[in-house]
Amino acid sequence: MPIDAAALPDLLSRLVAIDSTNPDLVPGAPGEGDIARFVADWLERAGLDTVVEDAAPGRPNVIGVARGSGGGRSLMLNAHMDTVGAGGMERPFSPKIEGGRLHGRGAFDMKGSLAAIMLVAAAARDANLRGDVIVTAVCDEEYASIGTQAIVERWQADAAIVTEPTGLDLVIAHKGFVWYAIETRGVAAHGSLPDEGIDAIAKMGPVLLGVQALDQALREQPGHPLLGTGSMHASLIAGGQELSSYPAACRLELERRTIPGETADLASQQLEMLLDGVRRADPAFTAELAMMLARDPFAIAPDAEIVALTRREAAAVTGRAPNLIGQGGWMDSSLLDAAGIPCVVFGPDGAGAHADVEWVDLRSVEQTAETLLAVASAFCS
């Protein structure tokens, strides 16, 4: 059964019209509840076995399964339902189609892909496949990816395609990240009593210089052929209570971007060495290091079956062989890979992720869906 391409513009418009802003990014935002209900109802009407599972209270995932006849391999198609905030976008939840492009918050990142995998699942139900096609519409990718983290704890598949927008190329590697907090300690005192106060903000100065030096050293390493090098930067800093006082504490939050072969443990060791160096230079230096969140980098071999199959079917649909590329941003593919599910990233073309003007190319969404159905037909037969 072919993709119902005629249903695509309306389906995507209805998805974009639902505000699914991630509440961990914008306090008070609605999150994924409304869009999860829409997706679940749509999948149920399409005849899929559909369940809604909370990754956390009020943060639902939707799983729809096009059941095979048995004996075939299963393929997971993954897309996230949440979006970042609307920022300065005009009418973010009023989708508009112009020149083959659908505009609106989340159209590109990544409701175009969500619409595509929903249509693929509906078509797969009537395709007489032996294996299951599993659609996972997940929450919270834009913040901590608790959605896909919950998926891999409860669901398994023989391969997966994460449908983040890639311009119809194939992403076979991306960076990871580790978030840290460093807090330096001082002694609060009146600003007129320099012999009693210790300035925690000033104590952070050597740490900032060390972060800059570590970043430079990382960038001088050979790096990954598709991703370049790892990096580190200071992201947020806060300290003190008023102008007339010595600050008792200063908190720095920083990000370490990692490439395949670099682990969170390695990044932590590098920071501990940095802090040890500051302590040796200043015996009065006191600081605490805490890891807040770690997400591993991702890489799959260019000749892996799911990569070669997706590339072959995409070339047949689009008329060109997709490039094998890397991307700097982190994706849920890392969690799937760590769970033992071989995966590749493939999705439509467009622009404006997290920007004030966002759009997705409708023809590329259709081509994404056609490619995914062809992959499922070959893989799950």
Image: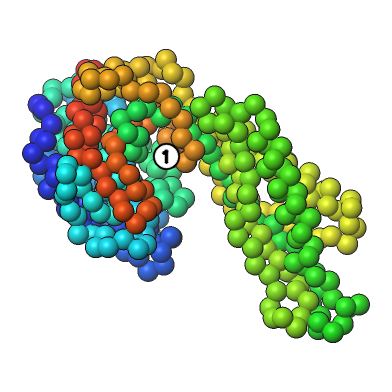
Residue type at numbered disc 1: Asp
State the quadrant of the C terminus: top left
Front residue (pair 262, 45): 262
Residue in the picture at 16% in, 48% down: 98
Q: Quadrant of residue 192?
A: bottom right
Q: Position of residue 347 (x, y in %)?
A: 30, 34
Q: Position of residue 160 (x, y in %)?
A: 35, 29
Left or right for 187, reference 232: right
Q: Is residue 71 above or below residue 36?
A: above
Q: Is residue 132 visible?
A: no
Left or right for 322, reference 237: left
Q: Position of residue 308 (x, y in %)?
A: 35, 17
Q: Is residue 97 visible?
A: yes
State the quadrant of the N terminus: top left
Q: Which residue is mark 1?
A: 332
Q: Position of residue 77 (x, y in %)?
A: 29, 34
Q: Quadrant of residue 346?
A: top left
Number of marks present in the image shown: 1
Front residue (pair 155, 43): 43
Front residue (pair 89, 175): 89
Front residue (pair 28, 136): 28
Characterize the local packing of mark 1: few (<14), some (14-19) or many (20 or more) Cα atoms within 10 angstroms: many
Q: Which secondary structure lies at badge 1?
A: loop
Residue in the picture at 71% in, 37% down: 217
Q: Quadrant of residue 219?
A: top right
Residue in the picture at 13% in, 25% down: 127
Residue in the picture at 26% in, 23% down: 314
